[in-house]
Image: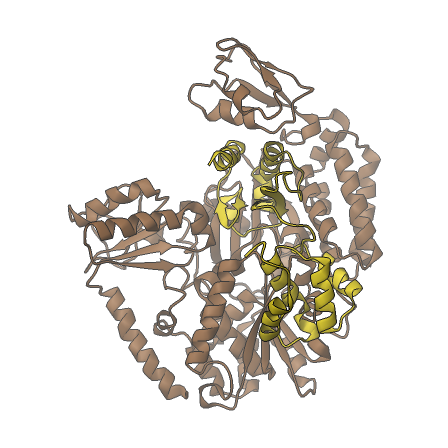
Chain colours: A brown, B yellow
Amino acid sequence: MNTRALDERRQKAASKWDELQNNRVPLIYIGAASCGLAAGAAEVQEVVENYLKKNGIEGRIIQVGCIGPCYLEPLMDVQMPGKPRISYSNVRPSDVPLIMESFFEKNEVAESRLAGHFGDAEFDGVPRFFDMPMLKPQVRIVLRNCGIIDPDDLDHCLARDGYLGLEKCLSMSWTEVLEIIKRSGLRGRGGAGFPTWKKWLTCRETPSDQRYLICNADEGDPGAFMNRSLIEGDPHAVLEGMLIAAYTIGASQGYIYIRAEYPLAIKRLKKAIVQMRGVGLLGQDILGSEFSFDIRIKEGAGAFVCGEETALIASIEGKRGMPRTRPPFPAVSGLHGKPTIINNVETLGTLPHILRNGAEWYAGSGTETSKGTKTFSLVGKVRRTGLIEVPLGMTLREVVFDIGGGTLKPFKAVQTGGPSGGCLSEEFLDTPIDYEHLAEAGSIMGSGGLIVVDSDTCIVDTAKYFLGFTQKESCGKCVPCRVGTRHMVKLLEKICDGRGELADLEKLEKLGRTIKNGSLCGLGATAPNPALTSLKYFRSEFISHIKDKRCPAIVCKSLVNYRVVAGKCTGCQRCVSVCPTGAITGPRSEPHNLDRSKCIKCRSCYEICRFDAIAGDAIIIES
Amino acid sequence: MKGRDSISEGGLSELRREFRGERGDLIPVLQRVQEIQGYLRPEAIRIVSRWLKISENEIFGVATFYAQFRFHPPGLHHLRVCLGTACHVRGGEQILLTAQQRLGVDTGETTPDGKYDLDRVACLGCCALAPVVAFDQKVHSQMSVLKIQRILDEHKSA
């Protein structure tokens, strides 16, 4: 298939998309990414299907990806003929009939659960969806199609300019494409922020009969899901990016290394690859050019270290995912000893937009040294959680408070870069988010995990959590990482258990520095960051644990106790029924007893006492 | 798919059609074997070893490196508690503790009746709806210790 055939397909796709925008039958959109499904989107869809069937309504249901504000999931949009698409949030299956009746029986916009409409103009007093405080400050470039199109329909992607970037790319020489990427200022979105063009040039200039391109979708940072959302919501953007990268570096074989924990993303990719083959976007002589390329999917088998380039390559080769010393860098000698480029999902997903709109357009967002936009998963104790995309250079305060709506309890810290990043205190809220400023603060940009914690989160416990994670995921090859992280975890456990000494803090710092300097790969070299930044910015919290044997956030189990407040306890026995160890006893209507020797501090009694109407908030946790 | 007969020559020929038998196929082959049999039995590893010409020792070395591979028969139902960062700061640890209590097993174990196994998972990617658990294929969001108790109790009595 040459470009003309694709153009014809694109025209057909455009009229199909047009029909969808000027629909004659009602359309119901369901946000059915992994997050939406976890929140109950499938159950909502079932009720919608039944309603349409029962009432003989000719309507269409379209599953879309995640549009970003996950805290509003499940999201369901209704688009009546001649009307804009109107979104409903936190829709429970029981809400569906009311919404449907309003539209189909009363011919009115349903008011309950209303989130906003997607139109450009004013509509019936309904607010615009993209004017919501969480969405308004965002700049959606990479995510432009997520939640808007049906990711399983190639036509939707084509109608919205999919593969136009590739066409432009194929009309140029590789040096011209490289020049555009250079001018755009794009840096690797996997975390380290190395200029994409530089890495590509090294690969291209290494003489070889074979070069490889690998898409790194092994999103290992626990607490980050940008890559999953992008693949689930717009798989073709990533695949088009792979074609552009492969063309520029001269690769004929590509791999997508993706976590097995993302079954839906894998399904979407597989389907998209079949669609690409069908229209000549993969295989020999793509779009009539001399460029040939193919893609294979490799599922990761659960190892965080495989996000590291050389470990990832070892894993694709069928070996233990252990990193090796660099140089030689993979761009010179990678998979099977051939020059290999490994790019993150988001880096690749950005390429089509740069090619289509130009380098200057992309470089128009961001800062002097960090151009463009970046996606983040904004999670933790923030009010509005979800996936966001913002221009680089926006401050942490704008992200946490304007977009995220702040925290319920007083803000304490924000962790960027996951287990490799740092924990930044309130004084850093005005730090612009870019590669340099975050590094200066002792953290890293990372792949885009932003975890916000409030006064209910213990910093020592969080540091212990991160170190525990990296310790478990350490591949064991080099001593500083294998042995060092274990000792750091032991020291942090000691402090959390109330057995810590002040000298342990210095030991932690010394160990941390040694591990950073002596480790073989990025996992070890960054593993101490969470502990070191916490020690630097939240030292008093460590000291409370050591000196006062107190956990100020009331989290560390050894330092907290549960107590029944006799005056408040109504004796309703709800806590007795949920206590897994029988630690709470007492006859009905009389204050209950809590036997601390049996209590495992699982929080069941606390939760039921707080949230159950007849119980009286009589159980407290204290430190 | 679980509980099907061991990789007989027939089962393996199915794999032979899917893979070229290259060294790089080792991990995907083991993933398929586990999908078919539920876990990696020593006999299966022996067969894969002869086929791909990789020693059994090395295959065990590779398989034990990755968290996905199991060497014991799985339970009928699979409860995975997510302990990603967002889940951790929103109380995932307590949910795991409660599940351990309710099922009477430790993480990584199967109940004596072979009905449930309990695992922790690094991240399911539903961080905005933390804490989450995956019960078989279904992900449950915004869990609490009470919700996990209810899910398990309802399932047990069903």
Residue A109 location (% of width, % of height): 21, 47
Residue A328 drawn above or below residue A131? below
Residue A338 location (% of width, % of height): 70, 80
Place residue A337 in its image quadrant: bottom right
Residue A111 drawn above or below residue A342? above
Can I make out residue A321 in this image? no
Residue shown at 26% from the left, 74% from the top: A15
Q: Residue furthest left?
A: A106
Residue A516 drawn above or below residue A574? below
Left or right of A402 in this view: B60: right
Left or right of A79 in this view: A368: right
Of the pair A503 and B29, the residue shown nearer to us: B29
Of the pair A269 and A541, the residue shown nearer to us: A269
Residue shown at 68% from the left, 79% from the top: A339
Q: Quadrant of the N terminus of chain A?
A: bottom left
Residue A112 location (% of width, % of height): 28, 41
Can I make out residue A294 in this image? yes
